[in-house]
Image (cartoon, coloured by chain):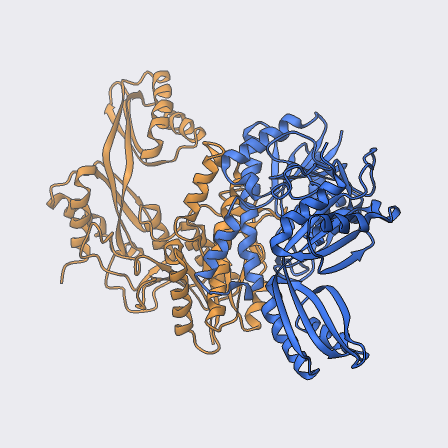
Chain colours: A orange, B blue
Amino acid sequence: MALIVKKFGGSSVATTEKIMNIAKRVLGEKQPNDKIVLVVSAMGDTTDDLIELAQGINKNPYQYTREMDMLLTTGEQQSASLMAMAFKTLGQDAVSLTGPMAGVKTNDVYTKGRIKDIKPERVHQELDAGKVVVITGFQGANDLGDYVTLGRGGSDTSAVAIAGALKADSCEIFTDVDGVYSADPRIVPGARKMREITYHEMLEMARLGAGVMQPRSVEMGEYFGIPIHVRSTFTTDTGTFIREDYTMEDKDFVIRGVAHDEKVAKIAVLGIPNTPGIAHEIFSALADANIDVDMIVQSIRNIEKNVTDMVFTVAAGDLPQAKKVVDGVADKLSAVAVLIEEDVAKVSIVGAGMLGNPGTAARMFGALSKAGINIDIISTSEISISCLVKGSMLKEAVNAIHDEFFPKK
Amino acid sequence: MALIVKKFGGSSVATTEKIMNIAKRVLGEKQPNDKIVLVVSAMGDTTDDLIELAQGINKNPYQYTREMDMLLTTGEQQSASLMAMAFKTLGQDAVSLTGPMAGVKTNDVYTKGRIKDIKPERVHQELDAGKVVVITGFQGANDLGDYVTLGRGGSDTSAVAIAGALKADSCEIFTDVDGVYSADPRIVPGARKMREITYHEMLEMARLGAGVMQPRSVEMGEYFGIPIHVRSTFTTDTGTFIREDYTMEDKDFVIRGVAHDEKVAKIAVLGIPNTPGIAHEIFSALADANIDVDMIVQSIRNIEKNVTDMVFTVAAGDLPQAKKVVDGVADKLSAVAVLIEEDVAKVSIVGAGMLGNPGTAARMFGALSKAGINIDIISTSEISISCLVKGSMLKEAVNAIHDEFFPKK
């Protein structure tokens, strides 16, 4: 007997036919005494359709965050009730519960809520009564009892948090892909499906551009110690387990994967006085404008005049706003110039294994060099190394590094 | 300063444009210190669309009553949140509340719930904070916290019950028609809009086929003593007030209206022994099958043989089931024959005034007679008289009676 939480995303429940198929599959895989909880997203494009509807009232409906959450939570409520009907139609008793009914408590940040606590008494009652329990993903209620959504992709977080609160044996996240790969298979055809990856590595992969899982859901998995099984909606193959540490002899590889991020822009502030507080001046102005700065390098331009250059990256979407802020500070500091470069991309390697392998960075730089790719900026964390390269060279860079660490057999 | 509850049905909120127009209208009519509560139905055909969606899972989704309520309540939640956004867009703070958030407590009868109690603390708080409060009609929650809908047309009941719990000054029901008429204007072109009608008269009109208001909502109005103002979504004209008694000198008319019901079928059980318990035998069998019997007449067929005929009407939709039940009983009683007639209709006059006007029935029968219309069965209540006539003569019958009591000027 096991208690298993299974999460199905919007494309998996896009039609009533798909909903019936999922119910059939879940019942087909269910062992007699298993307790099953499903967490579902809204059907297909429902959420986008609802946002469009709201735009018929106001061009910018997200300014009304509480009302947007009232509106958007209806999508999951619909798919959850239909899924419960599907199980009942197949002869398996079932019940749908909204996030609040399932005891999901959030903070007050409408449209970007965080789960504070889960009180799953009702879920246990329904499971004990022999029902499959279908819970709406993406939502909970604040102390006032109002709906609060968890932001895009929040259904993953719901599923893992509910699995944690229920002390589930595992949490399965069903997606369009069949696991976590050593690189994006659209860029690296020979990318390998990982059998396992640690929470830390997965978080670092996500931070560096790999979009399989919402980072918050991985943090939840780590917090509750729930193994997350990322697998395909379309096949019954085993996918990738995200967990605290490896359980199998899968330590052959120094790194877990190559991540990349194209949505990056570089800003260089040239010729500013190299005095204490200069970095603070620039970056606190950006922080005040709510702009995250990623890779930073400061280099000496002219040691006699004590003049320096400050180069850093921001998310491409933040560039116009960042440029405005930086131009203001550069004026004040009498900088020589502010240069913008948009044709840049970040390529990163991630792996807890690199801690005990001092040559890892050298191998990465060597692979790029051999491929004739120039490195612009380097940054490192405990379990990752990132290089900024020309955007037009990104595909070559990812493949060169992948070939180095995951040699073709 | 007044506290006013305004209810808008599905056709009034069918598009985002219509929702904006309602918000504009409500603000245009609002006095500075008025407190406004809106009760809204689901947009246009949303409820039907959701039922159709459920039929993609199961041909008969209403067997899963709890899940149907989970599904259908999303329609009102969408329109309510959009309505709140509309007010905010116009600069008027507003908040949408689900039935449960507004404190609407129901019994456990999913899809056909009844309101048990309303605890409107949250509504008062939001009104005191200067907000327009938009509440989802048609729904509440049972003790378990599950959604329970009030059945078709339940938004009227929600509105009146909420008005009662809030001790509102009035409850306005906005509809496609601009009030309660002395007859259906589609049948009687000269039908007159009534300025006032009592709860009892309105209930009797509804029972006898006039479909303006859900009877349960009128009962609620009577229970709470809340005047219900039935008026048009499209004009600002005064409509019809439903209240305990007339307040104006509008007592010119002995009756309030002529109601009719085409969805009637007649069953005649001929030649049964006239012994005690015969009526009980027939009608308890029908009651056991959950079939309501309306007009009943028992007549002597043959006094020597002590044989009688029993004639009665049922709702047309119940006919197949009723026929089956009656055939069984008729066999047992050795009845001569069971005859069915489907081309029948009921025409009724309603008015508290007829109590003090003994000639009212005679005037009704006379009008029918003058028009050459035969009366099949007659039944009466304290404030109504009904005649069963040939279905094909219904229009003539309604007009003849209407002309008698509301003479053309």
Q: Is residue B225 above or below residue B373?
A: above
Q: Is residue A79 above or below residue B235?
A: below
Q: Is residue B224 left or right of residue A209?
A: right
Q: Tell me how many marks there are.
A: 0
Q: Position of residue B195 (x, y in %)?
A: 75, 35
Identify which residue, B328 or A367, lies in the foreground.
Answer: B328
Picture quadrant of residue A331: top left
Q: Is residue A198 left or right of residue A301?
A: right
Q: In the image, what residue occupies the spot 48% across and 48% down?
A: A150
Identify which residue, B144 or B69, lies in the foreground.
Answer: B69
Q: Position of residue A363 (x, y in %)?
A: 18, 50
* Residue B66 in sight here: yes
Q: Position of residue A395 (x, y in %)?
A: 18, 45
Q: Is residue A150 left or right of residue A295?
A: right
Q: Position of residue B58 (x, y in %)?
A: 46, 65
* Residue A66 in sight here: no
Q: In the image, what residue occupies the spot 65% across and 54% down?
A: B261
Q: In the image, what residue occupies the spot 33% across and 25% down?
A: A323
Identify which residue, A14 or B176, lies in the foreground.
Answer: B176
Quadrant of the image containing the C terminus of chain A: bottom left
Identify which residue, B377 or B126, lies in the foreground.
Answer: B377
Outermost right residue: B356
Q: Is residue B137 left or right of residue A408?
A: right
Q: In the image, what residue occupies the spot 80% across and 44% down?
A: B225
